[in-house]
Amino acid sequence: MEAVAYSNFRKGLKDYFKQVNDNSEPLIVTNKNPEDNVVVMSKADYDAIMETLTVNANDYLMQKIARGEKQFKAGEFKQHDLIEDDDIND
């Protein structure tokens, strides 16, 4: 993860935003006081992290995931063909 000083971040704000979004790589913005440092990330990456945290905090979903993993490892699954858009409209 790259780090940049606040003053440089401010000067190149547009470029840093583009970099963060294009590379899907968070950026640490440092300040004189380390407690004031921040991390800049794309909205899509933030949303993905929040969704993962939500799923991990949901016991019911985690039990379903664990059950699915157990079934898969035991070979207890069915393989299905993907439905194509043409199949839906017929």
Image (cartoon, rainbow, N blue to C red):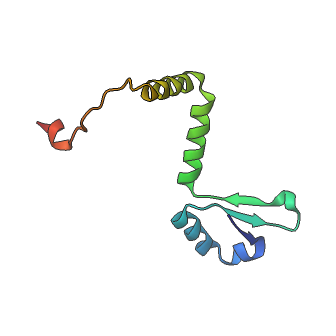
Number of on-image labels: 0
Residue farthest to the front? 74
Q: Is residue 14 left or right of residue 36?
A: left
Residue at the outermost left position: 90
Q: Is residue 4 left or right of residue 73?
A: right
Quadrant location of the N terminus in the rendered image: bottom right
Q: Which image quarter is the C terminus in? A: top left
Q: Residue at x 74, y 65 (%)?
A: 29
Classify 60 as above or below 26. Answer: above
- Image coordinates of residue 12 in percent, x first then y, are 65, 77
User: Where residue 55 sits in the image (x, y, percent)?
Assistant: 57, 32
Q: Is residue 3 above or below residue 85?
A: below
Q: Residue 33 versus residue 3: which sits nearer the camera?
A: 3
Residue in view at x 60 percent, y 32 percent: 56
x 15%, y 38%: residue: 87
Q: Position of residue 66 (x, y in %)?
A: 53, 26
Quarter-wise, where is residue 75 in the image? top left
Q: Residue drawn 69% across and 78% down?
A: 11
The spot of residue 28 in percent (x, y) is 72, 63
Q: Quadrant of residue 43?
A: bottom right
Q: Is residue 30 above or below residue 8?
A: above
Going by the image, does 81 lie left or right of 7?
left
Report which quarter residue 81 is drawn in.
top left
Relative to 58, is 39 on the left or the right? right
Depicted 74 relative to depicted 47: above or below: above
